Image (cartoon, rainbow, N blue to C red):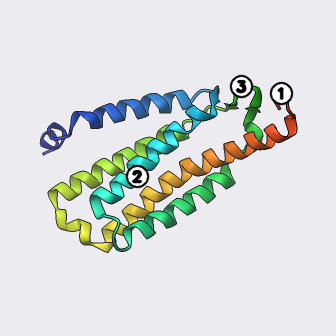
């Protein structure tokens, strides 16, 4: 059965997995990142999450509300847990110095594996999509994962903007 599942998985899924692993390993090291690049993973995770909700459950009924509640909870959690003291803004280069962490890789693999497992479950038992006991927790989790990425991004942008305001017109690093 596993062989059938893997053989019916489209090639682009494995490309996405490779990209996520690559980005997760990059995030494990302290590095300077431009604000533009910093947005890539939260936006990719947002797209994967919303496509998972839409493709599996649609945007009717409780699914988008469960996703939204999860996203708000995840964003609040990430905002609260992110340590702004470990983020160094460099306004002169429109970038930030971030500490390395394996958490992004763990989160990316969690959402990828969950999306994959949900797709397999629904391919085997399509009626499961109509069960609130399945759809609500899945949508909450999708939203929470996305919210964590977005909350972390928002916290980093807030630190950057604060440094930008205090650095003056020269854009010196804070």
Q: Position of residue 173 (x, y in %)?
A: 81, 28
- Circle 2 residues within 10 Å: few <14, some 14–19, many ≥20: many
Q: Quadrant of residue 127?
A: bottom left
Q: Which label was assigned to residue 93?
A: 3
Q: Quadrant of residue 167?
A: top right
Q: Which label was assigned to residue 131?
A: none
Q: Which label was assigned to residue 49?
A: 2
Q: Alpha carbon of mark 2 to alpha carbon of mark 1: how far? A: 37 Å
Look at discs 2 and 3 and give the one toward the viewer.
3
Q: Residue 117 vs residue 92: left or right?
A: left
Q: Residue at x 44, y 63 (%)?
A: 67
The residue that label 1 is drawn on is 172
Whichever of callouts 2 and 3 sits on the residue coming sooner in the sequence is 2
Q: Are marks 1 and 3 in contact (CB under 8 Å)?
A: no
- Circle 1 residues within 10 Å: few <14, some 14–19, many ≥20: some
Q: Residue 149 vs residue 45: left or right?
A: right
């Amino acid at each position: 059965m596993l062989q059938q599942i893997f053989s019916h998985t489209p090639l682009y899924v494995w490309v996405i997995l490779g990209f996520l692993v690559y980005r997760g390993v990059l995030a494990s090291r302290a590095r300077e990142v431009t604000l533009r690049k910093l947005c890539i993973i939260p936006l990719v995770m947002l797209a994967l999450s919303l496509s998972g909700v839409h493709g599996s459950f649609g945007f009717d009924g409780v699914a988008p509300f469960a996703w939204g509640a999860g996203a708000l909870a995840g964003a609040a959690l990430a905002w609260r847990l992110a340590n702004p003291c470990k983020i160094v803004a460099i306004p002169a280069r429109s970038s930030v110095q971030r500490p390395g962490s394996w958490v992004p890789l763990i989160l990316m693999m969690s959402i990828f594996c969950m999306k994959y497992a949900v797709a397999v479950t629904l391919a085997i038992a399509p009626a499961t999509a109509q069960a609130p006991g399945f759809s609500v927790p899945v949508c909450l989790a999708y939203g929470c994962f996305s919210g964590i990425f977005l909350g972390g991004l928002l916290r980093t942008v807030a630190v950057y903007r604060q440094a930008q305001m205090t650095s003056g017109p020269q854009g010196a690093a804070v």
